[in-house]
Image (cartoon, rainbow, N blue to C red):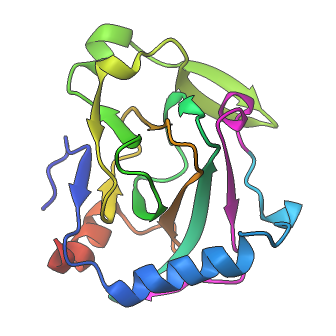
Amino acid sequence: MIDPDYTHLYFNNFPQNVIELLEKYYHDYGVGKGINRENYILWNPSAQAVSYPFFIKDKTIKIKGISFYPFYFVSYPNSGKSPIHLDRLRPFGLNIPIKVDHNRSKTLVDDGHFFEKYGEPSIEIHEGIEHYLWPEALESDMLSVDLDRPMLLNVSKPHGWTNYSNDIRVIASLGTVDPTLSLEQVYSALQIFI
């Protein structure tokens, strides 16, 4: 059983063939391919300043009997800190580094005292979708962790990322095709890779 207060969990033995397939998808669909606008996700305007997301609609990846769809988040060079936010449409992100400068780019997670410092998020509505943000949150008030291997990220808790590299930062963030699957079900299936 997963700790309900977890912020992130590393997978040290994640299948290499899945990582390679995600890298291939990114190179086949994302790099210099003029990504089709229909692949872009509706995205909060404040986040568009630091990154753009896209997904590949016709591709899924099966891991331990669970089908996942790949989202990719590409952060611009030297884009600094993303908005600290919550995801309300999914319970987790299974994040895999595709291109990350581990010295100049980090994942930011709740340090256990975030709500005491900042309270509830502000809500911005963009194209009918609610976005839960803390625009004033400081990077120093977050726990900074390295996305140097696949990570299960609790996106129902405050999180974000930084990119102070001169290069883009690319991660694949897998979500389940079946929206009824719980975090606990996914964790139970994938815990063999911890």
118 in magenta: no
24 or 101: nearer the viewer: 101
Image quadrant occupied by the C terminus: bottom left
**Can you give x and y, in whole percent of width and height, for residue 53 in the image?**
67, 53
**Which residue: 53% across, 77% down?**
23
Does any portion of residue 177 appear in the rendered image?
no
In-image side of 103 versus 126 (left or right): left
Does any portion of residue 9 appear in the rendered image?
yes
In-image side of 155 versus 194 (left or right): right
**Which residue: 49% across, 53% down?**
90
In-image side of 177 versus 118 (left or right): right
**Can you give x and y, in whole percent of width and height, for residue 2 in the image?**
16, 57
**Can you give x and y, in whole percent of width and height, for residue 15 in the image?**
31, 85
Range shown magenta:
43-62
**Can you give x and y, in whole percent of width and height, for residue 131 in the image?**
62, 32
Image quadrant occupied by the N terminus: bottom left
- 3 lies above or below 64: above
84 or 33: nearer the viewer: 33
